[in-house]
Image (cartoon, rainbow, N blue to C red):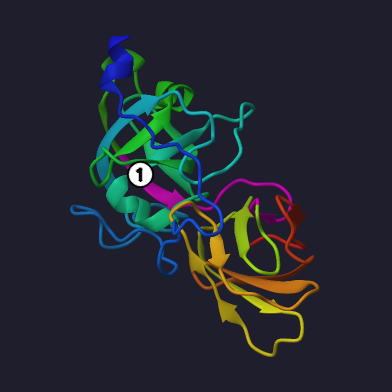
């Protein structure tokens, strides 16, 4: 369809496991203000400056570069433009988007490499809430907001995880995640873990057997500490709490 060709494509794809060299460098903060962004949050409850750009749409499923599971029951999702993707720092965060017809809050689950700074590539259903799909591409403004989530944060060990190679993804977080540290069994110190561009925090070195503590930090400095079982292939663990 013509509309599909007008819309930019999200950059969904599979993530690499241990030994592939796909790890990105250090954890990144929430995206820096794009050119033209306000110097400070401009809306009540905003966690970021206001960004301006263009909105498009694609056949989003909830999967993509952030390597979350598909979410057919909730497709209020979007792909972040390449520059503001910031090495996956935006994955899982919520943004309030305003277009010609209205406003909607979406969760970032993917990357749109072809999109310019300030742009968002929304799911078809999300785009229809802010603009007429016939338009294909519309001006938008958006800012980061706390997510309307229920239950505690959760953690997922990536396939291939073990005490020799640990990869952890944070899920269901109300606030953007800016850092993750681990304290393996018997360790006295916290170890900062680098975030990859596929949205897992990867510690590539061996750790002691047994449970490990995890400390996550959100935008603004709030922290949560949880104890996870020894790393195991594909396991999802519910945390004890949620960010305020």
Which residue in the rendered view is the most extreme toward the bottom? 188
Q: Residues within 10 Å of mark 1 (few under 14, many from 20)?
A: many
- When the figure is inspected, residue 103 is found, relative to residue 241, above or below; the finding is above
- Of all residues shown, which one is farthest toward the top? 1
Left or right of residue 20, residue 55 in this image: left
- Give the side of residue 213 with respect to residue 44, left or right: right
Q: Which residues are magenta?
A: 141-159
Picture residue at 43% right of the left edge, 51% below the top:
144
Q: Residue furthest front?
A: 19
* Residue drawn at 42 percent across, 70 percent down: 26
User: SS for tag 1?
Assistant: strand
Residue depicted at 44% across the width and 59% down the height = 21
> Which quarter of the picture shows residue 41?
bottom left
Q: Which part of the image, by quadrant, shows the N terminus? A: top left
Of residue 213 and residue 118, the one placed in the foreground of this image is: 213
The image shows residue 43, relative to residue 166, as above or below, that is: above
Residue 227, image x, y percentages: 77, 70
Write down the residue under mark 1: 142
In x, y percent, where is residue 178? Answer: 49, 66
From the top left corner, tell me how far across and down residue 120 is, in percent. Answer: 34, 38
Q: Is 166 placed above or below 64 here?
A: below
Q: Position of residue 173 (x, y in %)?
A: 61, 54
Residue found at x 55% / y 63%: 201
Tally of numbered discs: 1
Q: Tell me where residue 209 sits by quadrant.
A: bottom right
Check residue 147 for magenta coloring. Answer: yes
Report the front residue among 96 and 30.
Answer: 30
Q: Quadrant of the C terminus?
A: bottom right
């Amino acid at each position: 369809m013509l509309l599909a060709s007008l819309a930019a494509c999200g950059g969904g794809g599979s993530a690499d496991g241990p030994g592939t060299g796909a790890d990105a460098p250090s954890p990144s903060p929430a995206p820096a203000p794009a050119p033209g962004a306000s110097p400070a949050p401009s809306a009540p409850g905003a966690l970021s400056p206001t960004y301006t750009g263009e909105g498009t749409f694609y056949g989003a499923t909830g999967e993509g570069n952030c390597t979350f599971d598909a979410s057919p029951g909730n497709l209020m999702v979007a792909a972040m433009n390449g520059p503001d993707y910031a090495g996956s720092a935006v994955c899982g965060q919520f943004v309030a988007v305003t277009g010609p017809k209205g406003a909607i809050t979406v969760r970032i689950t993917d990357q749109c490499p072809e999109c310019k700074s300030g742009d968002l590539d929304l799911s078809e259903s999300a785009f229809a809430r802010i603009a007429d799909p016939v338009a294909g591409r519309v001006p938008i403004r958006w800012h980061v907001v706390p997510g309307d989530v229920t239950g505690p944060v959760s953690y997922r060990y990536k396939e291939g995880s073990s005490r020799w190679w640990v990869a952890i993804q944070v899920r269901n977080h109300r606030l953007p995640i800016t850092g993750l540290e681990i304290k393996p069994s018997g360790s006295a110190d916290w170890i900062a873990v680098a975030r990859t561009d596929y949205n897992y925090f990867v510690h590539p070195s061996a750790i002691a057997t047994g449970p490990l503590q995890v400390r996550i930090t959100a935008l603004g400095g709030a922290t949560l500490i949880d104890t996870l079982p020894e790393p195991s292939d594909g396991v999802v663990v519910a945390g004890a709490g949620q960010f305020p």
